Amino acid sequence: MLLRDDTTVSHPASTTTSLPLALLLATAFLSAIAPVAVDLYLPSFPQLADDFGTDQTGAQLTLTTFLIGIAIGQLLLGPISDRYGRRLPLIIGAAVCCIASAAAVFAPSLPILILARFLQGASGAAGMVIGRAIIADVASGRAAARAFGLMMTIGGIAPIVGPVIGGLLAAPLGWRGVLVIVLALAVIMIVVVVTVVPETHPAERRALLRQPSDEGSALRALRSRTFIGYSLICGFSFGALLAYVSASPFLYQGVIGMSPAQFGMAFGINALVLVAATFVSSRLTSIWPPRRILRLGILIMTAAITAFSLVTAAGWPPAVFAMCIPVMLAGFGLVQGNAVAEAITSVPRAAGSASAIIGFSQFALSGVTSALVGIDQDHPAASLSIVVFSCLAVMLVGLLISRRRAAAVPAPTGRPFR
């Protein structure tokens, strides 16, 4: 399907360019591989530690280096895809991911496994960062927001079912068997890229975008108020989400007094609320512009986080502030997809670089917020309220900054893929 031939638009959200369903499903799958690779083998950590004669910290290093690899991989592969196209870096990334996945399966020692997991994360990040750029290449406005929302809905299922499936497979397959499944997903990644994903950023467009324009270089567009504002929303809303994820075991089990089984049920319900909200957000784009949905989501998050903070400070029963969490997640579901869409489509000349900055900032900030909520382990609710309220304050600043939009933003021109 081709983009329209418009050369400029006054407001990106006012245009709509559709995205082929097969391509949408392919990008959603590519973006879900990394979360699956994280969550699927978490229940196997004790086995892994026993096999290598290490403690839980050693097993945790395989996860830490994987996440570092994802962050660095996104930061490198996004700009590379702007310069050399989307498809070739995706194919190379998928191939390296296969090799690294095989090395992880047969790793004879912990250091080799750690290195393999780093390379696996760095190469697997291609699906995440380039997938977002592909959507920005092909879709715009409400269609882009809807695509990002559906992409997040599909990708959001992976973190929910990953630990459950991993827990069921840990005993019969062991950690190596679980990583074989990750290897199979990497092989499928290559097949999907080769057979489904076209080149959405062809050579003629790359040459056109390197030509001087009235707006200056493509990278200069990344300094615009619009991109910076929406990027702040993307990064700090994700940071708030990961702060909740990190604090949730201590909050639900230590403070509320739930059993592990009850915590799993509560966490699953909250995750379903998040996925449902992202789906609702994708449907709302047919009647509302992305920014309006974004504002609604931030309003909901503001109400939930404020109530959570006040209830925590007042010392009310834990069950009361627990009710605020799914409301906050519902607001996040309305925010994230629309913020990503508005940020990346606001700089079509550097969609890959924009996607890289957003992805890197999300993982970097989530690492910071996850650490911050663990500083005061005796009062996890108070720590969480401080962290998420601080994230909310920056999100509100980002919303204010992004309010002033450029008068005209170039839309992608020429054929989106061939």
Image (spheres, rainbow, N blue to C red):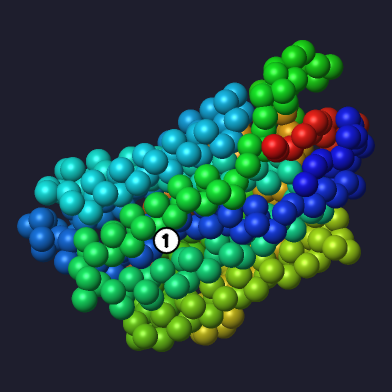
- Rendered view: 209 above or below 176: above
- Rendered view: 71 above or below 265: above
Depth check: give the residue in front, 177 or 56.
177
**Tag 1: amino acid:** Val
Figure quadrant of residue 250: bottom left
Depth check: give the residue in front, 218 or 228.
218
Q: Is residue 143 left or right of residue 61?
A: right
Q: Position of residue 51 (x, y in %)?
A: 10, 61
What residue is shown with label 1? 36
Q: Is residue 297 left or right of residue 82?
A: right
Figure quadrant of the C terminus: top right
* Point 85% across, 63% down: residue: 286
Q: Is residue 59 visible?
A: yes
Mark 1 crowdedness (10 Å alpha carbons): few <14, some 14-19, many ≥20: many
- Rendered view: 184 above or below 268: above
Q: Is residue 217 visible?
A: no
* Point 44% across, 55% down: residue: 188
Q: Position of residue 4 (x, y in %)?
A: 87, 40
